[in-house]
Amino acid sequence: MKIHKFLNLICLSGLLILASCSDDDDGPITNQIEAPATYVFERNGESTVSFGGQTTRIAMAEEIISALKNNTLTEATIDAMFAHVEGANDFSDATLNDSDKSVRSKTAASRDYFSANVTDATAIKQEFDGWIKSQVDEVFPNWGMAASAGTAGFIEEGGADPAIRYVNAKGLELNQAFGKSLIGALMADQALNNYLGIAVLDEADNVENNNNEVVAEGKNYTTMEHKWDEAYGYLYGASDNVATPNATIGADDSFLNKYIGRVEGDDDFAGIAADIYNAFKLGRAAIVAKEYTIRDQQAGIIREKISQVIGVRAVYYLQQGKTALEASAVDYAVAFHDLSEGFGFIYSLQFTRNPDTNTPYFTRAEVQALIEQLIGGTNGLWDVTPETLQTISEAIAAKFDFSVEQAGS
């Protein structure tokens, strides 16, 4: 870090602000912020970090994707879990039942992408509703029937310890499509396009209140601090230690956390977990220090890196499916499982955000075109070819700063 001739050190809430002055006493002052070692922020000796709503929705989403594999449940039961109403007995955890939160209400619901785009927001929610209905109406009745092209049912993997996959008539595992699509439509959309957005962070008198450390009513945090923390919660809300979540990254939930961990485990992308975590810490420190340019720079890093995670995993699963289809003895259970996960990550691309353009790396129309290539044939995944999977993979990688080879390994 370059430090100019005159240096003032100010300790504030566990973070170090370096106020470096120019040689000219009348020149500008530039504050450089050193983030704290952990995501710990306090006021008057008490934590200012809070994201209970995000932890709740992650837990709800976990139960929903489990419910999609329980063929004794009805559509109404799973619908009620998705669109939970406070006090309804929808979940195994009483605290979730008591909550006024729901997964459906925050699906495709970001301020930046959907406040003025009700048509797409409604259509996306209806697609999730449709996957629940199709699982119950098409897959559950055929739970004990072998799947084939045009017929829903089960496919058993080969090998000594085979898994059983349950697919619709097009070979799609709807529970996988639902879960991986939720990574984009809920977790990424809310974090990248809602809580890290200026429209939310700087709404109303948030800046003035943050500048004057005016806390929200009955709370120990300013509204701006809380909004940033809520974005953080969609990644780390289920972590064993939310202050140092990278110690268990990839093992704490089935959503963004899991796949940040998977991408981190690829040598081609090692360091991405630290990049995301460090940007969250520094951005939060910048809010405490009232340095909003630095805050927004860190939001841009988070958007780029999380979007990259989604892009990498889309290509990864397409390439794994391609390899399975190219085998001399095709294991359709393996291939369709990978491609169903790939479907969800492709779907999630419409919720990514390019920090240079403040738009998704792929528009909804572009995502729909990719999905049509993947599953639009008469028999869906039963018809898709390795050549088509390669074409889709190349189209995705071209929008990001990685190759098909890097992501697919």
Image: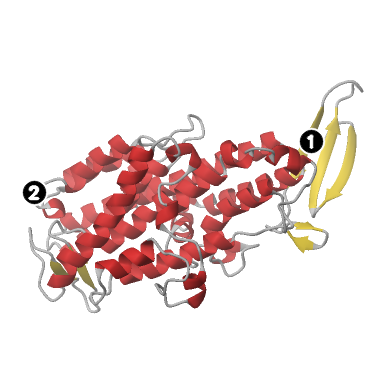
Q: Nearer the viewer, residue 247 or 122?
A: 122
Could you tell me the amino acid type at mark 1?
Asn
Residue 6 image position (x, y, % from top left) = 90, 33
Is residue 258 visible to the viewer in this orientation of the structure?
A: yes
Q: Position of residue 149 (x, y in %)?
A: 7, 59
The mark found on residue 227 in the picture is: none
In the image, is 166 to the left or to the right of 194?
left
Q: Which residue is mark 2?
A: 378
Q: Residues within 10 Å of mark 2 (few under 14, many from 20)?
A: few
- Which is more N-terminal, label 1 or label 2? 1
- 397 to 92, vertically: above or below: above
Along the line of sight, the residue nearer the viewer: 40 or 63: 63
Q: Amino acid at mark 2?
A: Thr
Tell me where residue 127 appears, x and y as whole percent: 28, 51
Residue 335 horizontal/vertical position (percent): 21, 59
Question: In the picture shown, does residue 152 fall above or below 7?
Answer: below
Q: Which mark is residue 31?
A: 1
Q: Secondary structure at mark 1?
A: strand
Badge 1: how crowded within 10 Å, few (<14), some, or many (20+)?
A: some
- Looking at the image, residue 5 lies above or below residue 317: above
Figure label count = 2
Q: Mark 2 touching mark 1, by CB under 8 A?
A: no
Q: How is the image coloured?
A: secondary structure
